[in-house]
Amino acid sequence: MNLSRGLAVPLSLIAALALSSCATGSADPAATAEGSDGTLDVQASFYPLQYVTERVGGEHVQVESLTPAGAEPHDLELSPAAVDGLRTADAVVYLSGFQPAVDDAVAQAAPEHVLDAVHAGVEGEEAHSAEEHEEAGSSHSGEAHGDDAPAGEQSAQGAAEEAAGDDGHGHAGEDPHFWLDPERLAAVATEVAHELAEVDPDHAAAYESNAEKLTAELAALDQEFTEGLATCERDTIVVSHDAYGYLADKYDLEQVSVAGFEPDTEPSPARLAEIGEVVEAEGVTTVFSESTVNPKVAETLAAEHGIETAVLDPVEGQVDESADYQQVMRANLEALRTALDCA
C-alpha cells in the first residue's frame, strides 16, 4: 500500500544490479557482515528511524538514512546505488507503506535482516482498533484517517474533514506518523535492539542497554508533554497537513488540518471556510505550518483571521542537523503551549 508519490526504481534495473553484484561480490556471507572498521552497516529509510537506530546501535553501527537531511520523505526517489546498498546492508529499518520507492527496493533487494517499524509503531499494543473507533462514534473525523485512525482527528465542530480518504498516503487511510507519540517510538527502539542482536550477538547486551536508556528518555519526554499540555485554555490545533493524529490522540488535542496526508495539497475554498469557522468558534490563535512545506496557505489563513503562525514540526526529516528528535519535539511542545495558552 502506498503512502507517498515517490517513484520506484524500474524492476529490470534492480534485477540487473542484483545479478551484477552476485557475479562480483564475495561468496562468503561473513565477509560482508561488518564494515572495515568492525561496525555494522545499517540503512534507515528516514530520520526518526535513523535516530532510533543510531541511539540503540551506538558505537557498533554506522547508520545511513535513505532520505537526505532536509528532504521531503514522502517524495523520495532512490538511485540504483541506494537500492544496491539495501542488498548489501547488514540490516535495514524502514516503515512499510510510507515511502513506495523504499517498499519496492526492499522487496527486490531482499536484505537478510530487515525490520518493518509498522509492527511496533503503527500496530503496537496501544493502537486503536476499528471497534474502538466505532464506539467513539461520530466525534471522530473518519474521512481523514480511516476506521483505524488515532482519536484526535475530530474537528472542533464535529464536521468531517474534506475528502482525504486513502490518497496513497496511509495504510488504508491510516496516519503513519506514529513517532509523534514518544512511547510508540520507544517500542521501535526495543525491536531495533532485537534485530541488531540477531546480526551481531556479541554486542546484544549493549544494544539492549542502549534501548533501555532511550526508552527511559522517551518516557520522560512523554511525561513532559502530558504535564505541559494538561492545563491549557484551548485544545484545538490548526495544522498544515494531516500528520498529527498520534500526537493529538495521546495528549487529548483536536487536530484540524488544512490539507490531507499530502502536505502540498491545495485546500478548496470550502475547506478554508470550514477551518475559518473553527478558528472563530474555538478562539484559535495560531495556524501551524511546517519547516519543509510552503507556509503560504497557513500565512494567508492566519492573516484573514488576524492570528499568528508558528512552526509545528512533524519530524519526518531532520531539517537542522544540530537538533535531534528530542530537541525538535521539545520545541514542538513549547510551540503548542504558547498557541494553546497553557498554564
Image (cartoon, rainbow, N blue to C red):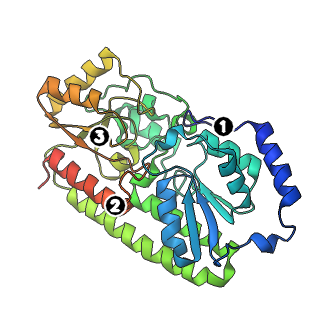
Q: CA distance from mark 3 to mark 2?
A: 27 Å
Task: Tell me: residue 101, above or below residue 69.
Answer: above
> x%, y% of residue 247?
35, 49
Residue nearest the viewer, comparing 250 with 23: 23
* Residue type beneath disc 3: Glu
Look at mark 2 in the image and give the residue it sits on. 323
Looking at the image, residue 56 lies above or below residue 275 = below
- For marks 1 and 3, give the CA distance: 35 Å
The quadrant of the rendering that contains the N terminus is top right
Which residue carries the number 1 mark? 8
Indicate the position of residue 46 as horizontal and vertical percent values: 52, 52
Q: Does residue 206 appear anywhere in the picture?
A: yes
Task: Pick whichever of labels 3 and 2 is earlier in the sequence.
Answer: 3
Measured from the top left, where is residue 339 in percent x and y?
17, 45
Q: Secondary structure at mark 3?
A: strand
Callout in the foreground (3, 2): 2
The residue drawn where x is 25% and y is 33% is 156
The image quarter containing residue 161 is top left
The kind of residue on which mark 2 rests is: Ala
Measured as percent of width and height from the top left, residue 317 is found at 43, 50
Task: Tell me which residue sits at (55%, 37%) in the image.
Answer: 3
Q: Please report whichever mark, 1 or 3, sits nearer to the chain's N-terminal start.
A: 1
Can the viewer see residue 126?
no
Residue at 64 percent of width and 67 percent of height: 41
Element type where label 1 sits in the image = loop
Q: Quadrant of residue 264?
A: top left
Task: Tell whether 2 sits left or right of 54.
Answer: right
Q: Which mark is residue 142?
A: none
What's the residue type where badge 1 is placed? Ala
